[in-house]
Image: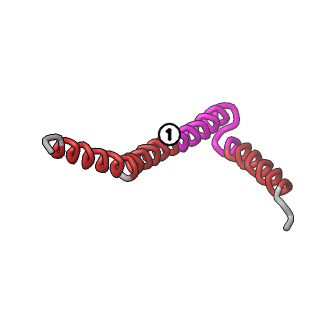
């Protein structure tokens, strides 16, 4: 009977550890992954925006403002037509 309080405390600690691993640890991992995903998406969006601004700036030097817009519009139209042709026809 002298060992009963120690066994009970170890048993309760084991239950608390299992409950934490099934709830709090999983939620913390999900929050961490979601946060990193949002940060990665923001960086990716910024990269795409800066890439388009750089391409526009590089085209604006030889072609002027309207010429750069025209070339980019043509590229986007070609990309859109290509994707439209690749769509599934349900």
Few, some or many C-alpha atoms within 10 Å of disc 1 (few <14, some 14-19, many ≥20)? few
Q: Which residue is mark 1?
A: 43
**Residue closer to the observer: 88 or 84:** 88
- Residue 7, by quadrant, is top left
**Residue closer to the observer: 88 or 81:** 88
Which residue is situated farthest in the bottom direction here? 90
Q: Is residue 52 left or right of residue 3?
A: right
**Residue at the image point whose x is 55% and y is 40% from the top:** 44
Q: Main secondary structure of the magenta part?
A: helix
Q: Is residue 18 above or below residue 53?
A: below
**Residue at the image point whose x is 46% and y is 44% from the top:** 33
Count up the numbered dots. 1
Q: Is residue 7 left or right of residue 61?
A: left
Instruction: Provide residue 35's location: percent of width, then percent of height.
Output: 43, 46
**Residue closer to the observer: 27 or 65:** 27
Q: Is residue 54 above or below residue 11?
A: above
Q: Is residue 75 left or right of residue 85?
A: left
Provide the residue span drawn in magenta: 42-68
**Residue at the image point whose x is 31% and y is 50% from the top:** 15
Specify the quadrant that holds the C terminus: bottom right
Instruction: Provide residue 56's location: percent of width, then percent of height.
Output: 63, 38
- The local secondary structure at tag 1 comes to helix
């Amino acid at each position: 009977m002298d060992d009963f309080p120690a066994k009970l405390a170890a048993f309760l600690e084991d239950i608390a550890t299992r409950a934490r691993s099934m709830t709090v640890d999983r939620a913390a991992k999900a929050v961490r992954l979601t946060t990193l995903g949002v940060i990665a998406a923001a960086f990716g969006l910024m990269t795409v925006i800066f890439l388009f601004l750089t391409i526009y700036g590089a085209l604006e030097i030889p072609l002027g403002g309207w010429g750069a817009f025209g070339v980019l519009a043509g590229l986007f139209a070609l990309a859109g037509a290509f994707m439209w042709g690749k769509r599934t026809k349900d």
